[in-house]
Image (spheres, rainbow, N blue to C red):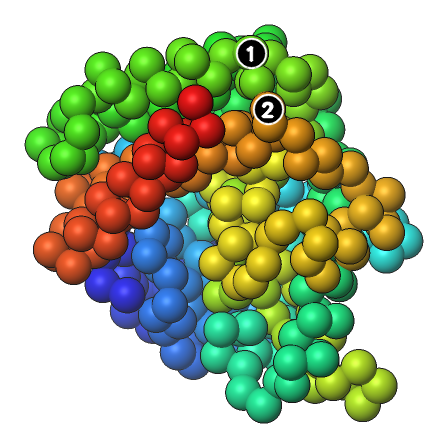
Amino acid sequence: MESLTKRRLSAGELDALMRGSAGIGCRLEAELTDGWFNTAYRVRFEDGRAAVVKLAPPADAPVLRYERGIMATEAMVYRRLAALGGEGVPGPELLHAGDGLLAVSVLEGTPWDQADGISPAAQGRLRRELGSIAARLHTVAPEDGRFGYPAPESALSAPDWRTAFTAMVDALLDDAERWDADLGLPPAALRSLVAEGAPALDEVTRPRLVHFDLWPGNMFVRADGETGARITGIIDHERAFWGDPAAELVSLAFGGDIGPDSDLVAGYRAAGGRLDFTGAFRHRVALYGLYLGLILVAECGPRGFGADRIAFGRGFLHERVAELRALG
Protein backbone atom coordinates (compact mmCIF):
# COMPACT_ATOMS: atom_id res chain seq x y z
CA MET A 1 0.00 0.00 0.00
CA GLU A 2 1.25 3.50 -0.80
CA SER A 3 2.20 5.52 2.26
CA LEU A 4 4.26 8.66 2.77
CA THR A 5 6.21 6.90 5.53
CA LYS A 6 7.76 4.33 3.20
CA ARG A 7 11.49 4.60 2.52
CA ARG A 8 12.36 3.26 -0.91
CA LEU A 9 15.87 2.27 -2.02
CA SER A 10 17.33 1.12 -5.30
CA ALA A 11 18.87 -2.35 -5.54
CA GLY A 12 22.33 -0.85 -5.22
CA GLU A 13 21.39 1.30 -2.22
CA LEU A 14 19.85 -1.67 -0.44
CA ASP A 15 22.92 -3.81 -1.10
CA ALA A 16 25.20 -1.08 0.26
CA LEU A 17 22.99 -0.61 3.32
CA MET A 18 23.10 -4.31 4.18
CA ARG A 19 26.85 -4.49 3.64
CA GLY A 20 27.37 -1.56 5.98
CA SER A 21 24.96 -2.81 8.64
CA ALA A 22 25.26 -6.61 8.52
CA GLY A 23 28.49 -7.15 6.59
CA ILE A 24 26.77 -9.08 3.82
CA GLY A 25 25.45 -7.98 0.46
CA CYS A 26 22.10 -8.84 -1.08
CA ARG A 27 20.29 -8.99 -4.40
CA LEU A 28 16.88 -7.34 -4.50
CA GLU A 29 14.18 -9.72 -5.73
CA ALA A 30 10.93 -7.83 -5.07
CA GLU A 31 9.29 -5.13 -3.01
CA LEU A 32 6.57 -6.48 -0.71
CA THR A 33 3.79 -3.93 -0.97
CA ASP A 34 1.18 -5.14 1.54
CA GLY A 35 2.53 -3.15 4.51
CA TRP A 36 1.21 0.27 5.51
CA PHE A 37 4.16 1.74 7.45
CA ASN A 38 7.60 0.21 6.85
CA THR A 39 9.12 -0.70 3.50
CA ALA A 40 9.81 -4.41 2.96
CA TYR A 41 11.94 -6.12 0.34
CA ARG A 42 12.46 -9.77 -0.45
CA VAL A 43 16.16 -10.28 -1.05
CA ARG A 44 18.73 -13.01 -1.61
CA PHE A 45 21.87 -12.67 0.49
CA GLU A 46 25.16 -13.36 -1.25
CA ASP A 47 25.48 -16.58 0.79
CA GLY A 48 22.26 -17.85 -0.83
CA ARG A 49 19.80 -17.28 2.00
CA ALA A 50 16.40 -15.76 1.18
CA ALA A 51 15.32 -12.99 3.53
CA VAL A 52 12.91 -10.13 4.04
CA VAL A 53 14.50 -6.78 4.83
CA LYS A 54 12.33 -4.17 6.53
CA LEU A 55 13.23 -0.49 6.59
CA ALA A 56 11.85 2.00 9.08
CA PRO A 57 10.59 5.35 7.76
CA PRO A 58 13.24 8.00 7.15
CA ALA A 59 14.41 9.76 10.31
CA ASP A 60 12.67 12.99 9.29
CA ALA A 61 9.38 11.33 8.33
CA PRO A 62 6.47 12.37 10.56
CA VAL A 63 5.03 9.46 12.54
CA LEU A 64 2.56 9.03 15.37
CA ARG A 65 4.04 9.26 18.83
CA TYR A 66 3.60 5.59 19.66
CA GLU A 67 5.44 4.68 16.44
CA ARG A 68 8.74 6.22 17.50
CA GLY A 69 11.34 3.47 17.67
CA ILE A 70 8.94 0.61 17.02
CA MET A 71 11.29 -1.29 14.71
CA ALA A 72 13.45 -1.94 17.79
CA THR A 73 10.29 -3.29 19.43
CA GLU A 74 9.84 -5.78 16.61
CA ALA A 75 13.43 -7.02 16.96
CA MET A 76 12.98 -7.34 20.73
CA VAL A 77 9.80 -9.38 20.29
CA TYR A 78 11.47 -11.77 17.84
CA ARG A 79 14.26 -12.34 20.36
CA ARG A 80 11.85 -12.91 23.25
CA LEU A 81 9.69 -15.32 21.26
CA ALA A 82 12.74 -17.26 20.08
CA ALA A 83 13.66 -17.80 23.73
CA LEU A 84 10.31 -19.44 24.55
CA GLY A 85 11.41 -22.86 23.34
CA GLY A 86 9.02 -25.79 22.91
CA GLU A 87 6.04 -25.05 20.70
CA GLY A 88 6.47 -21.34 21.32
CA VAL A 89 5.12 -18.84 18.81
CA PRO A 90 5.92 -19.69 15.17
CA GLY A 91 7.53 -17.00 13.07
CA PRO A 92 10.53 -16.06 11.01
CA GLU A 93 14.05 -16.10 12.40
CA LEU A 94 15.58 -12.73 13.16
CA LEU A 95 18.72 -12.64 11.00
CA HIS A 96 19.89 -9.09 11.66
CA ALA A 97 18.72 -5.95 13.43
CA GLY A 98 20.41 -2.61 12.82
CA ASP A 99 19.65 1.07 12.97
CA GLY A 100 16.31 1.45 11.24
CA LEU A 101 16.29 -1.96 9.61
CA LEU A 102 15.91 -5.64 10.31
CA ALA A 103 16.17 -8.82 8.28
CA VAL A 104 14.19 -11.99 8.90
CA SER A 105 13.97 -15.38 7.23
CA VAL A 106 11.26 -16.10 4.66
CA LEU A 107 8.23 -17.99 5.95
CA GLU A 108 6.66 -20.90 4.16
CA GLY A 109 3.09 -20.46 3.03
CA THR A 110 0.81 -17.54 2.20
CA PRO A 111 -0.72 -14.70 4.21
CA TRP A 112 -3.99 -16.03 5.60
CA ASP A 113 -6.05 -13.31 3.91
CA GLN A 114 -4.67 -14.44 0.53
CA ALA A 115 -4.98 -18.20 1.05
CA ASP A 116 -7.54 -19.94 -1.17
CA GLY A 117 -9.34 -23.23 -0.80
CA ILE A 118 -9.37 -23.54 2.99
CA SER A 119 -12.51 -25.42 4.02
CA PRO A 120 -14.74 -24.17 6.86
CA ALA A 121 -13.58 -27.10 9.01
CA ALA A 122 -9.93 -26.23 8.35
CA GLN A 123 -10.65 -22.58 9.12
CA GLY A 124 -12.04 -23.63 12.50
CA ARG A 125 -8.92 -25.68 13.25
CA LEU A 126 -6.74 -22.74 12.23
CA ARG A 127 -8.65 -20.44 14.59
CA ARG A 128 -8.13 -22.89 17.45
CA GLU A 129 -4.44 -23.08 16.58
CA LEU A 130 -4.30 -19.29 16.51
CA GLY A 131 -5.91 -19.15 19.95
CA SER A 132 -3.26 -21.44 21.38
CA ILE A 133 -0.50 -19.35 19.76
CA ALA A 134 -1.96 -16.17 21.27
CA ALA A 135 -2.06 -17.81 24.71
CA ARG A 136 1.63 -18.69 24.45
CA LEU A 137 2.49 -15.20 23.24
CA HIS A 138 0.73 -13.79 26.31
CA THR A 139 3.07 -15.64 28.65
CA VAL A 140 5.85 -13.17 27.74
CA ALA A 141 6.26 -10.43 30.35
CA PRO A 142 8.39 -7.26 30.47
CA GLU A 143 11.64 -7.42 32.36
CA ASP A 144 10.98 -4.11 34.12
CA GLY A 145 7.34 -4.83 35.01
CA ARG A 146 6.01 -1.71 33.26
CA PHE A 147 2.93 -1.35 31.08
CA GLY A 148 2.81 0.42 27.72
CA TYR A 149 5.10 0.66 24.71
CA PRO A 150 8.62 -0.80 25.02
CA ALA A 151 10.36 1.83 22.87
CA PRO A 152 11.63 4.60 25.17
CA GLU A 153 11.33 7.20 22.38
CA SER A 154 7.57 7.37 22.86
CA ALA A 155 7.74 7.65 26.67
CA LEU A 156 4.37 5.88 26.76
CA SER A 157 4.79 3.52 29.70
CA ALA A 158 3.82 3.48 33.38
CA PRO A 159 3.81 1.20 36.43
CA ASP A 160 0.06 0.57 36.13
CA TRP A 161 -2.20 -0.19 33.19
CA ARG A 162 -4.74 2.60 33.69
CA THR A 163 -2.02 5.27 33.63
CA ALA A 164 -0.24 3.72 30.64
CA PHE A 165 -3.41 3.22 28.59
CA THR A 166 -4.68 6.73 29.35
CA ALA A 167 -1.34 8.15 28.19
CA MET A 168 -1.55 6.05 25.01
CA VAL A 169 -5.01 7.46 24.24
CA ASP A 170 -3.93 11.02 25.05
CA ALA A 171 -0.95 10.70 22.69
CA LEU A 172 -3.23 9.65 19.83
CA LEU A 173 -5.65 12.50 20.52
CA ASP A 174 -2.69 14.89 20.42
CA ASP A 175 -1.58 13.32 17.13
CA ALA A 176 -5.08 13.70 15.72
CA GLU A 177 -5.08 17.39 16.65
CA ARG A 178 -1.61 17.85 15.17
CA TRP A 179 -2.77 16.40 11.86
CA ASP A 180 -6.15 18.12 11.97
CA ALA A 181 -7.89 14.74 11.84
CA ASP A 182 -11.66 14.90 11.99
CA LEU A 183 -12.64 12.32 14.60
CA GLY A 184 -16.30 13.23 14.35
CA LEU A 185 -16.39 13.36 18.15
CA PRO A 186 -15.03 15.84 20.72
CA PRO A 187 -11.72 14.67 22.23
CA ALA A 188 -13.11 15.50 25.68
CA ALA A 189 -15.91 12.97 25.18
CA LEU A 190 -13.40 10.26 24.27
CA ARG A 191 -11.26 11.07 27.29
CA SER A 192 -14.36 10.81 29.48
CA LEU A 193 -15.12 7.35 28.12
CA VAL A 194 -11.61 6.20 29.02
CA ALA A 195 -11.85 7.74 32.49
CA GLU A 196 -15.19 5.98 33.07
CA GLY A 197 -13.46 2.67 32.32
CA ALA A 198 -10.87 3.15 35.07
CA PRO A 199 -12.29 0.47 37.41
CA ALA A 200 -12.18 -2.10 34.59
CA LEU A 201 -8.64 -1.09 33.60
CA ASP A 202 -7.50 -1.37 37.22
CA GLU A 203 -8.34 -5.09 37.16
CA VAL A 204 -5.27 -5.61 34.95
CA THR A 205 -2.29 -5.99 37.28
CA ARG A 206 0.22 -8.07 35.28
CA PRO A 207 1.60 -6.74 31.96
CA ARG A 208 1.86 -9.23 29.14
CA LEU A 209 3.01 -9.02 25.53
CA VAL A 210 0.17 -7.94 23.22
CA HIS A 211 0.78 -8.05 19.45
CA PHE A 212 -2.27 -5.83 18.72
CA ASP A 213 -2.11 -6.42 14.97
CA LEU A 214 -3.17 -10.06 14.61
CA TRP A 215 -5.33 -9.65 11.54
CA PRO A 216 -5.11 -12.42 8.90
CA GLY A 217 -2.59 -10.53 6.77
CA ASN A 218 0.01 -10.87 9.53
CA MET A 219 -0.30 -14.67 9.73
CA PHE A 220 1.09 -17.16 7.25
CA VAL A 221 -0.59 -20.49 6.57
CA ARG A 222 0.19 -23.43 4.33
CA ALA A 223 -1.56 -26.58 3.22
CA ASP A 224 -1.25 -29.59 5.53
CA GLY A 225 -2.35 -33.08 4.63
CA GLU A 226 -3.85 -33.92 8.02
CA THR A 227 -5.60 -30.70 9.03
CA GLY A 228 -6.06 -28.97 5.69
CA ALA A 229 -3.86 -26.03 6.74
CA ARG A 230 -1.59 -24.90 9.55
CA ILE A 231 -0.11 -21.61 10.72
CA THR A 232 3.57 -21.27 9.81
CA GLY A 233 4.25 -17.94 11.45
CA ILE A 234 3.21 -14.59 12.88
CA ILE A 235 4.88 -11.43 11.57
CA ASP A 236 4.95 -7.63 12.09
CA HIS A 237 5.36 -7.30 15.86
CA GLU A 238 6.34 -3.62 15.76
CA ARG A 239 3.05 -2.39 17.24
CA ALA A 240 3.30 -4.66 20.27
CA PHE A 241 2.96 -3.31 23.80
CA TRP A 242 2.94 -4.58 27.36
CA GLY A 243 -0.64 -4.64 28.55
CA ASP A 244 -3.89 -6.54 28.86
CA PRO A 245 -4.16 -9.78 26.84
CA ALA A 246 -7.85 -8.94 26.28
CA ALA A 247 -6.67 -6.21 23.88
CA GLU A 248 -5.59 -8.93 21.43
CA LEU A 249 -9.23 -9.69 20.66
CA VAL A 250 -9.65 -6.38 18.83
CA SER A 251 -7.46 -7.34 15.87
CA LEU A 252 -8.31 -11.05 16.12
CA ALA A 253 -11.93 -10.07 15.42
CA PHE A 254 -10.95 -9.14 11.83
CA GLY A 255 -10.41 -12.85 11.17
CA GLY A 256 -13.52 -14.34 12.75
CA ASP A 257 -15.58 -14.91 15.89
CA ILE A 258 -13.98 -13.94 19.21
CA GLY A 259 -16.92 -14.81 21.45
CA PRO A 260 -16.71 -17.08 24.50
CA ASP A 261 -17.88 -20.12 22.49
CA SER A 262 -15.62 -19.48 19.49
CA ASP A 263 -12.91 -21.76 18.14
CA LEU A 264 -10.37 -19.06 18.90
CA VAL A 265 -11.25 -18.88 22.60
CA ALA A 266 -11.40 -22.68 22.83
CA GLY A 267 -7.84 -22.89 21.53
CA TYR A 268 -6.71 -20.11 23.85
CA ARG A 269 -8.12 -21.84 26.92
CA ALA A 270 -6.84 -25.27 25.89
CA ALA A 271 -3.31 -23.80 25.84
CA GLY A 272 -3.70 -22.51 29.39
CA GLY A 273 -4.84 -18.96 28.65
CA ARG A 274 -7.62 -17.29 30.59
CA LEU A 275 -10.34 -15.12 29.11
CA ASP A 276 -13.24 -14.30 31.47
CA PHE A 277 -16.06 -12.58 29.62
CA THR A 278 -17.23 -10.49 32.58
CA GLY A 279 -18.77 -7.05 32.25
CA ALA A 280 -15.43 -5.42 33.07
CA PHE A 281 -13.67 -7.61 30.50
CA ARG A 282 -16.12 -6.60 27.77
CA HIS A 283 -15.77 -2.96 28.78
CA ARG A 284 -11.99 -3.16 28.40
CA VAL A 285 -12.24 -4.83 24.98
CA ALA A 286 -14.50 -1.99 23.83
CA LEU A 287 -11.96 0.56 25.13
CA TYR A 288 -9.20 -1.17 23.17
CA GLY A 289 -11.42 -1.00 20.10
CA LEU A 290 -11.76 2.74 20.67
CA TYR A 291 -7.98 2.94 20.82
CA LEU A 292 -7.60 1.11 17.50
CA GLY A 293 -10.24 3.41 16.00
CA LEU A 294 -8.18 6.43 17.03
CA ILE A 295 -5.11 4.90 15.38
CA LEU A 296 -7.01 4.26 12.16
CA VAL A 297 -8.09 7.91 11.93
CA ALA A 298 -4.95 9.62 13.26
CA GLU A 299 -2.54 7.69 11.02
CA CYS A 300 -4.22 8.92 7.83
CA GLY A 301 -2.47 12.30 8.14
CA PRO A 302 1.17 11.21 8.23
CA ARG A 303 0.50 8.35 5.80
CA GLY A 304 -1.27 10.57 3.27
CA PHE A 305 -4.27 8.25 3.07
CA GLY A 306 -7.41 9.38 1.27
CA ALA A 307 -11.06 9.86 2.08
CA ASP A 308 -12.01 6.16 1.95
CA ARG A 309 -9.50 5.19 4.64
CA ILE A 310 -10.50 8.16 6.79
CA ALA A 311 -14.16 7.18 6.53
CA PHE A 312 -13.37 3.56 7.43
CA GLY A 313 -11.39 4.58 10.50
CA ARG A 314 -14.00 7.07 11.67
CA GLY A 315 -16.77 4.50 11.21
CA PHE A 316 -14.83 1.92 13.23
CA LEU A 317 -14.22 4.48 15.98
CA HIS A 318 -17.86 5.49 16.18
CA GLU A 319 -18.99 1.86 16.41
CA ARG A 320 -16.71 1.32 19.40
CA VAL A 321 -17.95 4.50 21.05
CA ALA A 322 -21.55 3.32 20.60
CA GLU A 323 -20.59 -0.03 22.11
CA LEU A 324 -19.02 1.65 25.15
CA ARG A 325 -22.05 3.84 25.68
CA ALA A 326 -24.31 0.79 25.48
CA LEU A 327 -22.18 -0.96 28.08
CA GLY A 328 -22.53 2.05 30.36
Residue 280 seen by the camera: yes
Residue 63 appears at what percent x and percent y? 27, 37
Q: Residue drawn 78% across and 56% down?
A: 267
Q: Amino acid at mark 1?
A: Pro
- Residue kind at label 2, given as amino acid type: Ala
- Residue 22 drawn at (x, y percent): 55, 54
Q: Tell me whether the residue at label 2 lies in contact with that at label 1, contact meaning CB atoms closer than 8 angstroms.
A: yes
36 on left or right of 180 = right
Q: Which residue in the structure is indicated by mark 2?
A: 280
Q: What label does residue 199 carry, if any?
A: 1
Q: For residue 95, say whether it is visible.
A: no
Q: Earlier in the sequence, mark 2 or mark 1?
A: 1
| 270 sits left or right of 16 in the view | right
Find residue 7 and report its image quarter: bottom left
> To which quarter of the image does residue 301 belong?
top left
Estimate how packed mark 2 is, as few (under 14), some (14 to 19) or many (20 or more) residues with alpha carbons within 10 Å: some
Query: Is the N terminus in the top left, top right, bottom left or bottom right quadrant?
Result: bottom left
